[in-house]
Amino acid sequence: MKLLVGGNHFFSFSVDLEKNRQYLVLRGYWEDVTIGDDFLKYNQQSIDMLQPGFTTLIDIAELEAPSEELMQEIVRTYSNYIEYQ
């Protein structure tokens, strides 16, 4: 059974504890990086609920492609976060 961890209109994180799986749904058009302000928080919360070796299923069916500039900003923002983990 899926449990909703959190999200907003543009993304959501859920987990299935029996399947040891994280679900990420991305949707809409991300105009700027602040749309994902809580993205890392909900990602970490969902990971903390799962066991090592979990799988992640990402649904991008409703995601509209962001601009190249925004993609560069997203990569820069999250790359810095990942380097410190």
Image (cartoon, grey):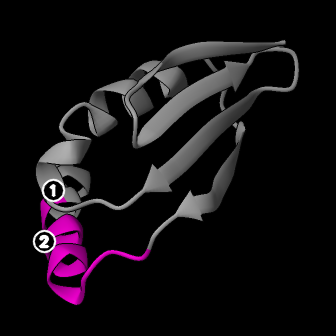
* Mark 2 neighbour density, 10 Å: few (under 14) some (14–19) many (20 or more): some
Q: Are marks 2 and 1 in contact (CB under 8 Å)?
A: yes
Residue in the picture at 18% in, 74% down: 70
Left or right position of 53 against 62: right
Q: In which quarter of the image is the N terminus?
A: top right
Left or right position of 61 against 39: right
Residue under pointer 1 = 33
* Magenta stretch: includes residue 71: yes
* Distance in Å between CA atoms under marks 2 and 1: 7 Å
Residue under pointer 2 = 73
Left or right position of 34 against 51: left
Work out whether 59 lies above or below 22.
below
Q: Which amino acid does label 1 sit on?
A: Val
Residue in the picture at 58% in, 44% down: 25
Q: What residue type is labelled 2?
A: Glu
* Mark 1 neighbour density, 10 Å: few (under 14) some (14–19) many (20 or more): some
> Which quarter of the picture shows residue 11?
top left
Q: Quadrant of the C terminus?
A: top left
> Which quarter of the picture shows residue 61?
bottom right
* Magenta stretch: includes residue 20: no
Work out whether 30 lies above or below 45.
below
Image spot of residue 75 (x, y percent): 23, 71
Say what secondary structure mark 2 lies in.
helix
Camera-side residue: 76 or 64?
64
Which residues are the magenta region?
Answer: 65-77
Camera-side residue: 54 or 21?
21
Camera-side residue: 15 or 81?
15
Residue in the picture at 42% in, 33% down: 43
Say what secondary structure mark 1 lies in.
helix
Residue in the picture at 21% in, 45% down: 35
**Rendered image: mark on residue 17:** none
